[in-house]
């Protein structure tokens, strides 16, 4: 039986996944080795046709990602699956006919029959089961907050890589030192220079196509590096990195969505970096409070206890830092910000901020978009003009000004 096409939606909780929700559907964040969208496709054998999300993301464009669509764009003539972006499924067969789909006792999605009306925006924000439909419980988990990417990330990544390497050939290039029995898997064209130490005592190390690992690096699994990434040296452990991530220094229990640079020394740990982030030399975050207490995050009037003892920084898309920038435990930096200087910035940096320490002004629209166009062009990204126009829409939303 042909499976219905799927659409992934962001509910009210996903809308608050700051700083990442400003610039991307939550189905296109990275959790473990996969985005939630790719995970649904792999685990359940469906094709995600689009994202239903915040209106200012209507022109979202990213290579390999489905578009953002309106509810009216979902064709009612065919069966459809609506799936919440925060629900993380394990391998399961989804039904082809009307049903309520549950994960850990919460509604993760529904299957709609052909001709049945698509639910409205209020349902998307707070989904409710379809009356009279069978209830099907599926294996999986939920992401409740953006710091779950840090708190649960290494365990999720290790599980992903165990499945990834099943049946794959273990490889030890000449001159590479090994510890442990879990596999080191190299994608086509990947290279590891002599003098690298690979520690797979805890979990595998998987290097995607054309990944380069330079001499002087120590990789401690679980490590996943996406296509065309470069691991340039230093101690790197429990890393999940999307495509074209350039990393050096001490990197620990960190997720990098892709196309981001930390090409110099400095420590980044228990952190999440969005796409197109550039960290200046020696940029360093603290990931543990001096009193070993739980880390709190949020704007001054809405601080939340994460329950985590270790949490470094959450850095939105297109953020830039200058050399020597220091980030306090639990710092959140909004998308499009450019910060520098020796003074610690606030723990909560609004999107499109510009400046040093507490002296943060607005990152001007024209300056930000000019830099973004240059950066996108340096990585040969298709549809640069469309991507820049989308970022202009996001700037308008965040700063409340018309184009």
Image: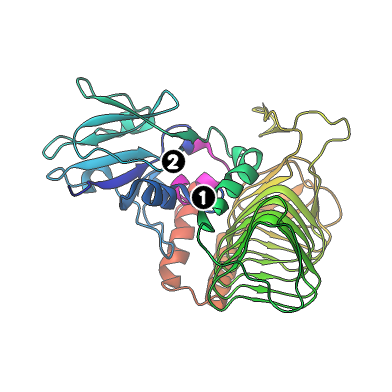
CA gap between label 2 and label 1 equals 17 Å
Task: Residue 117 in the image: state x and y as whole percent.
Answer: 16, 35
In the rendered image, residue 137 lying in the magenta stretch gets the answer no
Which residue is label 1 attached to?
29
The single residue placed furthest to the right in the displayed view is 290
Badge nearest the viewer, 2 or 1: 2
Q: Is residue 72 above or below residue 66?
A: above
Nearest the camera: 317 or 114? Answer: 114
Image-based side of 117 in relation to 100, left or right: left
Element carrying mark 1: loop
Is residue 13 at least partly visible in the picture? yes
Residue in the picture at 57% in, 74% down: 374
- On the image, the x and y values in percent for residue 326 come to 82, 52
**Residue segment shown in magenta:** 15-31
- 42, 22: nearer the viewer: 42
Nearer to us in this view, 147 or 317: 147
Tell me: residue 342, above or below residue 150. below
Above or below for 91 versus 215: above
Residue 128 quadrant: top left
Q: Would you identify the image quadrant in which residue 81 lies?
A: top left
Image quarter where the C terminus lies is bottom left
Decide if residue 30 is on the left or right side of residue 42. right
Rendering coords of residue 69 (x, y %):
30, 50
Residue 22 in magenta?
A: yes
- Image x and y of residue 301, in percent: 66, 27
Q: Which mark is residue 90?
A: 2
Q: Residues within 10 Å of mark 1 (few under 14, many from 20)?
A: many
Q: Looking at the rendered structure, which numbered label has been put on residue 263?
A: none
How dense is the environment of label 2, judged by Cα within 10 Å: few (below 14), some, or many (20 and up)?
A: some
Q: Residue at x 50, y 77 (%)?
A: 380
Seen in the image, is 189 located left or right of residue 47? right
* Scheme of image coloration: rainbow
């Amino acid at each position: 039986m042909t499976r219905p096409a799927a659409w992934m939606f962001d509910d009210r909780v996903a809308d608050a996944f700051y700083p990442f929700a400003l610039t991307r559907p939550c189905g296109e964040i990275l959790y473990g080795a996969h985005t939630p969208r790719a995970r649904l496709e792999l685990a359940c054998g469906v094709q995600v046709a689009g994202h239903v999300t915040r209106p200012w993301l209507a022109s979202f464009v990213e290579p390999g990602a489905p578009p953002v669509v309106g509810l009216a764009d979902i064709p009612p003539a065919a069966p459809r699956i609506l799936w919440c972006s925060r629900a993380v499924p394990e391998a399961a067969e989804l039904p082809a006919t009307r049903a309520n789909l549950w994960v850990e006792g919460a509604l993760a999605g529904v299957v709609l029959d052909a001709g049945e009306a698509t639910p409205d925006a209020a349902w998307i924000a707070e989904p409710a089961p379809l009356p009279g439909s069978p209830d099907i419980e599926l294996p999986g988990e939920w992401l409740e907050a953006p710091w779950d990417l840090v708190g649960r990330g290494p365990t999720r990544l290790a599980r992903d890589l165990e499945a990834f390497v099943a049946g794959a050939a273990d490889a030890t290039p000449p001159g590479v030192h090994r510890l442990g029995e879990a596999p080191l898997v190299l994608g086509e064209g990947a290279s590891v220079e002599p003098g690298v130490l690979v520690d797979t005592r805890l979990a595998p190390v998987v290097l995607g196509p054309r990944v380069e690992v330079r001499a002087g690096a120590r990789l401690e699994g679980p490590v996943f590096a996406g296509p065309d990434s470069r691991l340039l040296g230093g101690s790197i452990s429990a890393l999940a990195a999307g495509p074209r991530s350039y990393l050096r220094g001490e990197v620990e229990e960190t997720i990098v969505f892709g196309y981001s640079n930390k090409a110099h020394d400095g420590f980044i740990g228990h952190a999440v970096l969005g796409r197109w982030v550039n960290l200046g030399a020696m940029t360093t975050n603290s990931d543990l409070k001096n009193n070993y207490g739980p880390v709190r995050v949020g704007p001054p009037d809405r601080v939340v206890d994460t329950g985590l003892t270790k949490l470094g920084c959450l850095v939105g898309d297109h953020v830039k830092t200058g050399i020597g920038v220091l980030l306090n435990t639990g710092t959140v930096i909004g998308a499009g910000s450019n910060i520098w200087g020796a003074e610690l910035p606030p723990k909560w940096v609004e999107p499109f901020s510009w400046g040093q320490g507490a002296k943060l002004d607005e990152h001007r629209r024209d300056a930000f978009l000019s830099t973004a166009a240059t950066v996108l062009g340096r990585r040969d990204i298709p549809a640069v003009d469309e991507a820049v126009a989308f970022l202009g829409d996001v700037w308008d939303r965040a700063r409340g000004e018309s184009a």
